[in-house]
């Protein structure tokens, strides 16, 4: 089940004329959850068709995968929720917008007088046009031990990176808006992070863990509230009971082990816009 814990506040976020950011992100997450369920159900049917009932729960849904696989899931969801969208869109870095003389003096030009691509521009994960608004989205993901939810260095580092990238995207979109208001109306950028709650356990222990899912889910919500800057949008998605027992992975590849499972009861979605006017 998809559950909203905290939503963006403020007139700018809920501006239905420009495009309600809460509605946009909720639409995206509904599509993410629905597509994850569809793909997982197909995998259940494919495994069951092999005639081996012991493998029907060796599942590997895209919502528990690495960031690259998960990004495809979000690309599909964003495309369905928005008027139009693009992935990996080039954005010119504001700090690199210099005169030719300044570039030449700084040594940033190559032998042909062109700016090297590495210093010329970056890319934003997604651009979506929703209502009368263009939205830049920077996506990150990380795992969280659902037995003892806490902020790890990896979670903090990836959240900081997502926020830094969202601020850069915001500046770039504002520059584009000044040049082309039709294609880049009311620009806003979001840092979006997916936290997958999981732990290794025995198959026999899954039913016992399911009894305390509400407690561990709330512990994870309390943990992410300690991020700085704090998320201003928090939602959770609890996997159906039959989809929480997943096949273990090793180095990103499925690695079945008899009697063992990767227990994955829920994921958290946290977000924050790059501009302070939308913060709670």
Image: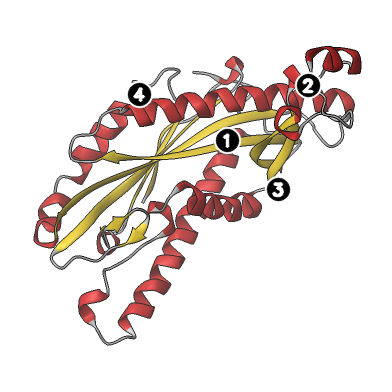
**14, above or below 83, in the image:** above
Distance from disc 1 to disc 4, alpha carbons, whole Å, reads: 19 Å
SS at circle 4: loop
The answer to whether residue 100 is left or right of residue 171 is: right
Look at the image and tell me whether residue 232 can be seen: no
Distance from disc 1 to disc 3, alpha carbons, whole Å, reads: 14 Å
Q: Residue at x 38, y 52 (%)?
A: 64
Distance from disc 2 to disc 3, alpha carbons, whole Å, reads: 32 Å
Distance from disc 2 to disc 1, alpha carbons, whole Å, reads: 27 Å
**101, above or below 65, in the image:** above
Nearest to N terminus: mark 3 or mark 4: 3
Q: Residue at x 15, y 68 (%)?
A: 258
The mark found on residue 85 in the picture is 3
Few, some or many C-alpha atoms within 10 Å of disc 4 (few <14, some 14-19, many ≥20)? some
Few, some or many C-alpha atoms within 10 Å of disc 1 (few <14, some 14-19, many ≥20)? many
Residue highlighted by disc 1: 138
Residue highlighted by disc 2: 108
Q: Position of residue 62 (x, y in %)?
A: 43, 57
Q: Residue at x 87, y 35 (%)?
A: 182
**Of residues 207 and 263, which is closer to you in this image?**
263
Q: Residue at x 15, y 45 (%)?
A: 212
**121, above or below 229, in the image:** below
Q: Position of residue 195 (x, y in %)?
A: 38, 40
Nearest to N terminus: mark 2 or mark 3: 3
SS at circle 1: strand
Q: Position of residue 123 (x, y in %)?
A: 68, 37
Nearest to the eye among marks 1 and 4: give it: 1
**Of residues 269 and 93, which is closer to you in this image?**
93
Residue highlighted by disc 4: 225
């Amino acid at each position: 089940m998809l559950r909203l814990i905290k939503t963006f506040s403020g007139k700018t976020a809920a501006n239905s004329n420009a495009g309600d950011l809460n509605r946009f992100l909720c639409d995206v997450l509904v599509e993410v959850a629905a597509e994850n369920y569809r793909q997982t159900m197909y995998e259940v049917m494919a495994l069951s068709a092999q005639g081996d009932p012991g493998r029907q729960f060796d599942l590997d849904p895209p919502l528990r995968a690495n960031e690259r696989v998960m990004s495809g899931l979000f690309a599909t969801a964003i495309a369905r929720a928005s008027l139009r969208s693009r992935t990996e869109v080039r954005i010119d870095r504001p700090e690199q917008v210099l005169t030719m003389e300044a570039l030449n003096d700084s040594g940033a030009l190559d032998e042909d007088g062109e700016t090297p691509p590495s210093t010329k521009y970056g890319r934003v994960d997604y651009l979506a046009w929703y209502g009368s608004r263009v939205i830049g989205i920077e996506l990150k993901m990380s795992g969280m031990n659902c037995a003892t939810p806490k902020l790890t260095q990896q979670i903090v580092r990836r959240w900081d990176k997502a926020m830094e990238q969202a601020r850069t995207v915001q500046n770039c979109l504002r520059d584009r808006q000044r040049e082309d208001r039709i294609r880049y109306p009311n620009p806003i950028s979001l840092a979006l992070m997916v936290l997958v709650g999981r732990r290794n356990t025995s198959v026999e222990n899954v039913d016992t863990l399911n009894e305390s899912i509400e407690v561990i889910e709330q512990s994870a919500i309390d943990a992410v509230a300690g991020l700085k800057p704090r998320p201003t949008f928090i939602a959770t998605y609890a996997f159906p009971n039959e989809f929480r027992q997943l096949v273990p992975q090793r180095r990103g590849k499925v690695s079945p082990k008899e009697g063992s499972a990767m227990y994955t009861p829920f994921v958290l979605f946290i977000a924050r816009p790059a501009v302070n006017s939308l913060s709670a």
